[in-house]
Amino acid sequence: MNEDKAPYTNFMDIKQWQLPPEELERIFEDLKASMPATDDPWGVNLDKMKQYFQFVWPIYKHYFKVELHGEDNVQNEHYLVVSNHSGQIAIDGMLITTAFATEMKPPRLLRAMVERFFIKLPFVNKWAQEGGAVLGDRQNCINLLENGHSILVFPEGVPGVAKNTSEFYHLQNFSNGFMRMALKAKVNILPVAVVGAEEYFPYVYQAKHLAKFFKVPALPLSLNYIPLPSPTDIYIGRPIILPTDISDDANDDVIAPLVDKVKNQIQEMINQGLTKRRVSPVNDYLGQVVTEIKNLWKK
Amino acid sequence: MEKIDVTKNLNVLIIGMSGGLARITAEILVQKYPHWKITGVDSRPLATPLEHPQITFTQMLYTRGNFEKMFRPSEGSKGHDIVFHLGRMGVSQYQKRSYISQRLNLNVMGTGRILDLCQKYPVKKMIILSTYHVYGANPDNPVFIKEDAVLKGSIKYPELRDVVEMDQLCTNWMWKNKSSIETLVFRPCSIIGPQIKNAMVNYLLTPYAPLALDFNPMFQFIHEYDMANLLASSIEGLPTGIYNAAPPDVISINEAKKHLAIPTVPVALFILEQLAKLMNKTLWKIPGYFLDYLKYSCIIDTKQLSSSLPKFNFRFNSKEALEQLKMS
């Protein structure tokens, strides 16, 4: 009888899906060393964050099978990280921050910007704050950058995350605010592209009028309300060095070309990522079903 | 504008002398400047008699006539050189509507009269204690609210109207008279200590006070001694302006409660809000607006103070201030 145990002997044993304890300890020791000794004014709690990571990691690594590319582009400095927004419920922010914390050496604490709407939500507010997310307010971001923190922004805002199926992977308008923040705080921009998150909810219609009626930022009508396990790739591009002779108060026509440069670079990274896209069997099967239904409808 | 010469015999008036902070401030002033004469006034009696002969206390109703008597130079008295206005009626507990209007009258109208008298019988320095509550606990508050931020404290809670109006009245007056009177408006974070009786201290020390399960805002706590010392130190160091005041560290409300080791009732906020309405009328005495401070952070920026008064050191950080409160 063979005494060797198979790697996954018990499927329901959560520990096999989690980060190994020694790896988790190393990450959080490094993160603690990178933070001031006093409590964080924005409310991040590394002990709580460590607990959350035990739940997030299985989703990150084994459900969405996230792969990080281009981590060599990250130097030892703080950045304004700019990403495309997708996935209907903003899971992409959680995945990017997890990637920066767990797959970089040394680990990096990225502060994701969240909508005011989320700040008002019970429990969500607390978990987001303890996990490192902060209010997406311009002054707040500048304060973070000036205190040496890297922040993650989604300049598309809600229109980026809440897209109809026909708009998947087409970047929406970028606001100019993030560029003014980067210029004011004199930090470089790190472009990030997330490929795979749009397929968490592959067939979506955004009921914008209903969303307005219920006073919520978006109301997606979808075939599924639990995200599908679409494999996700996170691509980190080369940092965009900003000119030092442009003021953060410059006119929009001066700022707009800089914003377009960032947007074009991220769109280019998405397009390249789509050529290497991994497809999940579930999405593949659902795609076939929908195509069959469409064909039947045409007949 | 005449500069204050601290070596001269100066007269100091402290309004709100029966409060814990005013008392500590007076004691620090006596130690620093033993040749000064300090007069304290309050509508309330003193809790315990004053020990220093340099400090005199007058209990009086806050009326225009009484204040005029207090400010008017009389025989043998040359009027006041420095005035500390620490006499704002606080919102330390649930209050009835009639009491709120009384507070509005005293805090806004009364402060207006005091400012008029400071101009009429010119004082050299006016030091006013406001509060960080003027900014309000809002979901869209950035971390580190600067002194020039919009005062949103009374938007949701009209019972804070007097707090905001008094602050605005004082700052307007300050800029209007900046060429003749040096005026300081302090907006400190939560002042805590054994002698302080405000809403925060009530909440922190109330056993089985509800603690939100679903929110955990960050707080800054300044110890009563540090605040009093700052008020006393500001006479020589600070130029006219508005100053946020807080020690350099922060602590979450859950941690603060853990530090104090006073039992709490963990409860989700939507239950807590209903519970507060019920409890306020019976057992629990926490003002309604205070619940928002248990939801959203209101962290103030203190760069202005630290750059204008670089030599000032806080003796206690927020955690140590809580320790002191626990020991009291």
Image (tube, coloured by chain):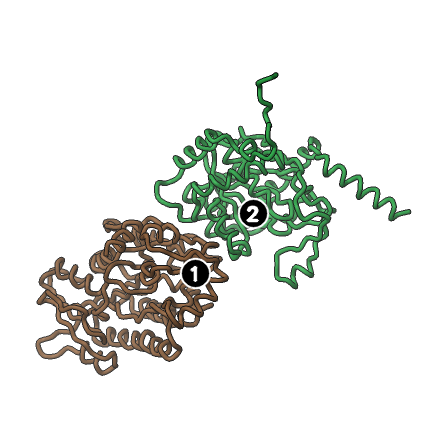
Chain bearing tag 1 is B
> Which one is closest to the eye, mark 1 or mark 2?
1
Question: In the rendered view, does B89 fall on the left or right side of A234?
Answer: left
Residue A295 falls in image quadrant:
top right
The residue where tag 2 is placed is A255
Q: Position of residue A35 (x, y in %)?
A: 39, 39
Chain bearing tag 2 is A
Disc 1 element? loop
Which chain is represented by brown in the image?
A: B
Label 1 to label 2: alpha-carbon separation: 33 Å
Q: Position of residue B108 (x, y in %)?
A: 34, 75
Please report the residue visible at 27 percent of the width from the left and 51 percent of the height from the top.
B323
The residue where tag 1 is placed is B137
Q: Are marks 1 and 2 on the same chain?
A: no
Please report the residue visible at 56 percent of the width from the left and 47 percent of the height from the top.
A255
Work out whether residue B140 or residue A54 is closer to the camera in this orientation and state it: A54
Residue B24: mark: none
Q: Amino acid at mark 2?
A: Ile
The crowd level at tag 1 (other Cα within 10 Å; few <14, some 14-19, many 20+) is many
Question: In the rendered view, does B325 fall on the left or right side of A53?
Answer: left
Q: Amino acid at mark 1?
A: Ala
> Which colour is chain A painted?
green
Q: Position of residue A91 (x, y in %)?
A: 59, 44
Q: Is residue B54 above or below residue B105?
A: above
Work out whether residue B126 or residue A249 is closer to the camera in this orientation and state it: B126
Question: In the rendered view, does A77 fall on the left or right side of B197?
Answer: right
